[in-house]
Amino acid sequence: MKDKVIIVEMLVEKIEQYAKTSLELYKLKAIDKGTDVFSSLISRVVIITIIALFFLLVTLGLCFYLGEVLGKVYYGFFAVAGIYAVVGIIMIIFRKRWLDDTLNDYIVRQIFKEKKR
């Protein structure tokens, strides 16, 4: 009888160790996926920032050029502001399809992609 109690105690201990190990494994996998998504998003933010700076400089050049063509510098700025207003309205209209869904799909793909080791 005492042997059965010892075996049951050992079995309970092994199950407890398995549960703790499984929980730790899930925590580590979640941290791994979280860091993958975070690092990927950070690299994209850096790239987007560089592209935004490029477009800022192109925009300033376009403003000054159009201002020269139109006769007054501020006319160029008004013209480019109008272009940005139209682009902004289009982005607001199609935000869900172009931005929200794309970002959600990207994050889900990052979470469920397999690592190449």
Image: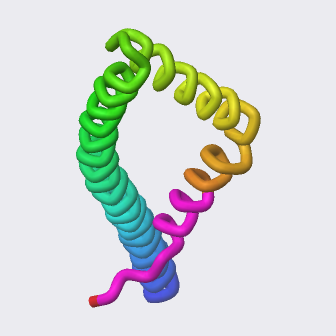
Residue 28: x and y in percent read 33, 64
Query: Is residue 25 among what the camera can see?
Result: yes
Q: Residue visible at 49% across and 65% down? A: 111
Residue at left offset 46%, top offset 68%: 19
Magenta part of the chain: 105-116
In the rendered image, is residue 16 in sight? Answer: no
Above or below: residue 97 compared with residue 58: below
Give the quadrant of the C terminus.
bottom left
**Relative to 4, does residue 45 appear above or below in the rendering?**
above
Name which quarter of the figure residue 105 lies in. bottom right
Q: Nearer the viewer, residue 98 or 66?
A: 66
The answer to whether 101 appears left or right of 63 in the picture is right
Q: Residue 12's x, y, as percent?
A: 48, 73
Q: Residue at x 33, y 40 (%)?
A: 55
Q: Is residue 110 magenta?
A: yes
Q: Main secondary structure of the magenta part?
A: helix
Pinpoint residue 4: horizontal percent, then vertical percent.
Answer: 51, 86
Residue 60 in the image: above or below residue 25: above
Percent across and percent down for residue 33 are: 39, 63
Q: Is residue 39 magenta?
A: no
| Count of numbered marks | 0
Q: Using the image, determine if residue 37 lies above or below residue 42.
A: below
Q: How is the image coloured?
A: rainbow
Residue at image location 38% in from the left, 14% down from the top: 71
Nearer-the-camera pick, 64 or 96:
64
Q: Nearer the viewer, residue 81 or 7?
A: 81
